[in-house]
Image: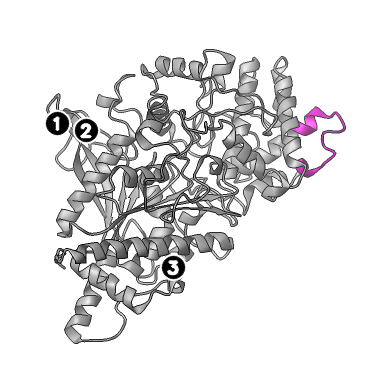
Amino acid sequence: MRAKLSLAVVLLLLVHLTDAARTTARRPRHPARSYRPTETDLEKVSSQPPGWTPKGSCQERWRDAPLDHFSWAAPTETYRQRYFFCPHFWEKKRDALASKKRDGSTHEATPRLRGVASLHASSSETTALDAGFTKSGPPIFFYTGNEANVELYLNATGLMWEHAESFGAVLVFAEHRYYGRSKPTPKKDATPSEPKNPSVGGIIPGHLKKKGEYPYLTSEQAMADYATLIRELKTEMRAPDAPVFTFGGSYGGMLSTWMRLKYANVVDGAVAGSAPIWSFVGEDPPVDPGAFADGVTLDATAAGGSPPACASNVRAAFKELLARSDTPRSIREPMRLCHDVALKDKDDVLDVALWAQGAFDYLAMGNFPYESSYILNGDGTLPAYPFRAACSGSLADPHLNSGGDGDALLAALADAVGVYYNYSKTQPCFDTGRGSNDDSDEDGALWDYQYCTEMFMPMSRDGVRDMFFEQPWNETAAVLECERRWGVRPKTLWATTVFGGRRLSWASNVVWTNGYLDPWAGLGVQESLSPSLVAMMLPGGAHHLDFMWSNDLDPEPVIEARKTQMKLIRQWMLNKYRAVATRGERIAEL
C-alpha cells in the first residue's frame, strides 16, 4: 500500500500495476487482538472459581511440528508450535464418575449448564455418554486456529467454554503456523523449549526472509499440524478413540470444515461459524465476487435494521469523494483528516476512500446486538449494532443528497466511519495511516501470502448493487501482482480441487452457521445439504456471533443455533461411542 495502514483499518491489500489491479480485493481478515472476556462472561462457567481466566485455566504448551508434512526430499525440519491444553472439565467428570462408581451413588454425575440443560437428553443417552466417556475417553473440543494469535480465540470462544462441562470435554486451542508465537525459525535460533523472543514483531529470519520462501505457510500444512497434534494428545491421554470435534470461526471455520473432510478418521464432527468455504474460483455455480460488498450494503438498509436512506447516502458520499480526485486537498476539512495525511493526487484520494470503506466492512462483521470490544482488540468498545449507529446520524436524512452540498455528504461519511475509527471519541482528526491495532502488519503480510497461493478469493464492488464504488475483479492483474510481491503464482483452482467446492454431498457431520448481518454469509453454506450436513441462517446475527459468549441480548435464532450445535455434537458423540462399544474394546485409562 502507499500508506502503511493497520489491518484493523485496511479491508483491502492493494496492488499497483493498473487502476483495475489497484482495487483488486483481498479477503478482509481479523487483526491480532488482545480481547478479554468480561467478568459476566466468565461467571457463566459455574465450575470455575471466581476470578478465573481461560488462559489461566489451561496449560500453555509447545511441540515440535514438522515444517513440511508432505515431502521426503530433505531431512525433516521442525518448528515450535504453541497450543493450549485445558483438561479441567475432563478431570472433573472423570473424578465424579469414579466417585459415583466407588460409592454406588445414583446421583447425576454429569453436570448441566444453561443452553445444554434444555436439550433433554434421555436417561439412556446420558448412560451411553457416561459409559463411552469411561471406555473411550473424553470428547476433545479442538479449535482450529486462524490467522492471528490463538489467545484471541481462547478468550473469545464462549461457545466451547460454556458447553464443555456438560460433556466433560478437553478443550484444545491450537495456533496456526507462522501466526502468533508459532513462528518457524532457523535452527541456529531455536532453543530446546520455545522460540527465541517469540513475541517480538516483524518478519523474522529464516523461512520468512525473502519472497518466494514461504512454501510451508498453507492451510494444508496447518491442518496436518492439527491432525498430528490430535493423535499425539490421544496417545498422551491413552484414549485413541476419544471423539474429536473441531470448532472454528471465519478462516478457522473453513479449517474446521476441511479438517472433517480431509481427516474424517481423526475428526468426528465440525462446527463452523461464518466460514466462507464457497468463495473460490472454479465453483459450480461460479462464486459471486460482489457477494461480500452486497452483504455490507444490506446492513445499511431497512432490511439490516438501518435507516432506509443510509445506503444511498453512502453511495453518494463515495461518489463525491472520488469526484474530487483532481482537487485532493478539498477533502481534508469535511473528512476531518489530520494535516499530515498525504493529499497530493488521485491515488491519495483513493486511499482515503478505501480507508473509509474498511470501516463499514468491519462494522458489518461486528454488528453485534450488544456493546462489544471484540472488533477493537479489547482496546475500546463499539455500541450495540454499531452499523446502525453509523447510519443513524446525517446519513439517515433522506434529503442529504438533494441540496448539492458535497461537503455535507463527506462530513456525514466522516461521522459514520468515526463510529469505528474514533470509538474513543477523543480523536480531533483522522489519521488514515493508523487503525485500532499497531501490531498486525506481520499477520497482514502472512495472510497476503496465503491469498497469493491457495486462498485466492475473487472480490469486487461496483457502486450499483452495493453502496461503494467501482472495484472490478481482475484475475490477471491479481496474479501478476502476486508474482511481483511474493514471487509466486496463485493456484487459482486449487482450493476447489482439493476441498471439493460445492460438491459436498458425500461428506457428513458438519454444522455451519451464518448471520444475516454478516457480509461473509453470501459466501458460505446457507442451506442444509443432508441430515448430517446442517446449515443455519441466523437473523440478527453478525460474524460468528454464535461462537461468542452468550448474552441476554442474543437474538433467539442464535440461542437456538447453539442448542442445535450441541444436539448434533451429542448425537455424533453417541455414534462414536457406540461404534467403539460394538468392537468390545476398553480403551481409555482414567
- Image coordinates of residue 213 in percent, x first then y, are 29, 22
Q: Residue 44 shows which numbered tag?
A: 3
Residue marked by disc 1:
76
Residue marked by disc 2:
67
Tag 2: Cα neighbours inside 10 Å, few (<14), some, or many (≥20)? many
Q: Is residue 412 visible?
A: no
Name the image quarter holding the C terminus: bottom left
Residue lying furthest right: 403
Kind of element beneath mark 1: loop
The reply, left or right, for residue 46 in relation to residue 220 is right
Q: Which residue is found at the position 59% from the left and 15% from the top?
A: 19
Q: Residue 204 shows which numbered tag?
A: none
Q: Give the residue type that dot 2 points to.
A: Leu
Q: Are marks 1 and 3 in contact (CB under 8 Å)?
A: no
Stretch in magenta: 394-409
Kind of element beneath mark 2: loop
526 to 112, vertically: above or below: above
- Image coordinates of residue 397 in percent, x first then y, are 81, 42
Ranked by sequence position, the earlier of labels 3 and 2 is 3
Q: Nearer the viewer, mark 3 or mark 2?
A: 2
Q: Nearer the viewer, residue 132 or 454?
A: 132
Q: CA distance from mark 1 to mark 2?
A: 7 Å
Residue lying furthest left: 75
518 to 202, vertically: above or below: below
Q: Quadrant of residue 566?
A: bottom left
- Image coordinates of residue 139 in percent, x first then y, are 28, 61
